[in-house]
């Protein structure tokens, strides 16, 4: 399989479909780099079991696979109907009751999970239910009851989500369940923690503090799915390790017409601020049922790749779909096809800012790689920081990131263009470590005799944040590095 040539990473959500015998192994073989545990569904024991299975199957296959734990967040939902679904007709009155003791709903009224919703709305507001399939216009607020009329009707069933068009709901980013789930994510050794409905940097910092207090080291992923998050995008990116364009709720809040441009803006700004970006939600939704994607879905994935996203994500397609392996295989093929048309960034000198030595080394490496022709860039890295900086520049040169730290290698599974490789230079001086790294990659058939490579490292191997050297090497007979030249 040609998955090692693919630059864009694939995230697949686990669920009942991947619990079927052999399916997890097959989707990893098809090219999954990161698995997502959706903490909105299932018990803690289910997630712990799936995490253990991922580690075991990845070890069996000799692959690095990272785990992303995705918090439910404070999604507002209606409660349950006495008999569901109900059919709402345009023009009819419909009440939302913000009362913990609201009885089961009917065609005229329903309770809501967010009891302060009545404080956040006013007459004329539009409330969207079930990802925008149902629309209600607020007429008035009477006590804790929101009186509305239906503007877009249809069937409505239990526990569907509610959004306010334009955003503006004041509920906190972390519910009590999320705080418990952060502790669960730490227990299962999650490499990434996705924070749902983040609207400011403080939401990310609170999640990070709770994760560290629970003994976890997961990187923080901010899910951009509120209108307010778009306005606070720069501070959220800076507070996070990665950003996810969560297009479901975001599209409902800002409107479908605005979504494509906002997606491109989020990708562009995240890369410019040296962070990782994921594009998610309904990328190949038809493959929940169909064995092949639609042309529109192919174009959607390809456009995200061409825009420079680090990763694309499958949700229901793998968690509950009929064809998880085919969905992953289709996404892999589309990524590879789009990458063949991808044009590397030709304006490195003026487009990117850096304030650390390793970032300067990364920029210099990419500048040089684009002008002298090298087969690869090899980064000896302790934490993966240099590899992340290298990957931001979106060149056409593959990056091999050699690290002795398993946690760092798993985190690098989300970096576009980067292939993390287990390598321990501890106790060896920098020159010998460089030669050993080239020999290691040659033995793995990642490099061939006669190829030129750029190698970056620090003066002292195994030191966090110490990359300060760039070298040009040629792979000699038998993989021996020759003609070392400091640049």
Image: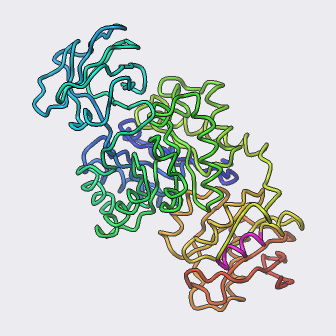
User: What residue is shown at x 82% (from left), y 75% (from top)?
Assistant: 475
For this rendering, which residue is in front, 273 or 473?
A: 273
Q: Quadrant of residue 102?
A: top left
In this image, 45 relative to 376: left or right? left
Q: Is 358 situated above or below 85? A: below
For this rendering, which residue is in front, 56 or 381?
A: 381
User: What residue is shown at x 23% (from left), y 19% (from top)?
Assistant: 95
Residue 311 image position (x, y, % from top left): 58, 49
Residue 438 image position (x, y, % from top left): 73, 76
For this rendering, which residue is in front, 57 or 431?
A: 431
For this rendering, which residue is in front, 414 or 154?
A: 154
Q: Is 81 situated above or below 143? A: above
Residue 38 image position (x, y, % from top left): 37, 45
Q: Is residue 362 magenta?
A: yes
What is the total number of numbered labels drawn onto the structure image? Answer: 0
User: What residue is shown at x 65% (from left), y 61% (from top)?
Assistant: 418
Q: Is residue 96 magenta?
A: no
The range drawn in magenta is 356-365
Residue 106 image position (x, y, % from top left): 19, 15
In this image, 347 relative to 166: left or right? right
Residue with the most extreme right position: 372
In this image, 238 relative to 42: left or right? right
Q: Quadrant of the C terminus?
A: bottom right
In this image, 270 relative to 102: left or right? right
User: What residue is shown at x 59% (from left), y 27% (from top)?
Assistant: 293
Q: Main secondary structure of the magenta part?
A: helix
Q: Is 212 situated above or below 323? A: below
Q: Is 93 situated above or below 243? A: above
Q: Quadrant of residue 297?
A: top right
């Amino acid at each position: 399989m040609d998955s090692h040539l693919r630059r864009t990473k694939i995230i697949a959500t686990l669920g009942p479909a991947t619990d079927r015998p052999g399916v997890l192994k097959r989707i990893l073989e098809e090219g999954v780099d990161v698995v997502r545990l959706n903490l909105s569904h299932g018990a803690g024991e289910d997630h712990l079991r799936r995490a253990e299975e991922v580690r075991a199957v990845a070890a069996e296959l000799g692959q690095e696979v990272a785990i992303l734990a995705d918090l439910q967040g404070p999604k507002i939902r209606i409660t349950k109907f006495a008999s569901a679904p109900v059919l709402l007709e345009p023009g009819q009155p419909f009440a939302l009751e913000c009362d913990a003791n609201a009885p089961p709903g009917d065609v005229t009224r329903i309770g809501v999970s967010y009891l302060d919703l009545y404080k956040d709305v006013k007459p004329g507001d539009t409330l969207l239910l079930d990802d925008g399939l149902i629309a209600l216009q607020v007429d008035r607020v009477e006590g804790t009851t929101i009186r509305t009329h239906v503007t877009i009707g249809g069937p409505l069933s239990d526990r569907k989500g509610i959004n306010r068009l334009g955003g503006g709901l004041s509920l906190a980013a972390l519910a009590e369940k999320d705080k418990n789930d952060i502790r669960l994510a730490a227990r299962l050794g999650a490499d990434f923690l996705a924070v749902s409905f983040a609207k400011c940097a403080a939401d990310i910092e609170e999640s990070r503090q709770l994760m560290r207090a629970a003994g976890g080291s997961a990187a923080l992923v901010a899910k951009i799915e509120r209108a307010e998050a778009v306005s606070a995008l720069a501070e959220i990116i800076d507070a996070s390790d990665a950003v996810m364009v969560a297009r479901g709720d975001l599209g409902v809040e800002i409107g479908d017409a605005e979504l494509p441009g906002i997606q491109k803006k989020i990708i562009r700004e995240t890369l410019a601020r040296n962070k990782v970006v994921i594009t998610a939600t309904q990328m190949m939704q038809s493959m929940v049922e169909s064995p092949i994607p639609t042309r529109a879905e192919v174009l959607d994935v390809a456009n995200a790749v061409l825009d420079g996203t680090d990763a694309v994500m499958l949700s229901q397609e793998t968690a509950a779909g009929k064809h998880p392996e085919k969905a992953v295989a289709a996404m892999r093929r589309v990524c590879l096809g789009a990458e063949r048309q991808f044009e590397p960034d030709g304006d490195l000198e003026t487009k990117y800012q850096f304030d650390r030595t390793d970032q300067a080394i990364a920029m210099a490496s990419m500048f040089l790689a684009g002008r002298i022709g090298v087969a690869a860039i090899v980064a000896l890295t302790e934490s993966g920081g240099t590899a992340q900086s290298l990957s931001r520049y979106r060149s056409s040169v593959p990056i091999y990131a050699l690290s002795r730290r398993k946690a760092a290698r798993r985190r690098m599974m989300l970096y576009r263009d980067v292939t993390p490789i287990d390598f321990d230079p501890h106790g060896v001086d920098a020159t010998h470590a460089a030669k050993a790294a080239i020999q290691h990659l040659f033995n793995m058939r990642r490099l061939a005799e006669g190829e030129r490579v750029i190698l970056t490292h620090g003066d002292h191997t195994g030191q966090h944040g110490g990359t300060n050297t760039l070298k040009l090497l040629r792979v000699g007979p038998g993989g021996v590095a020759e003609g070392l030249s400091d640049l």
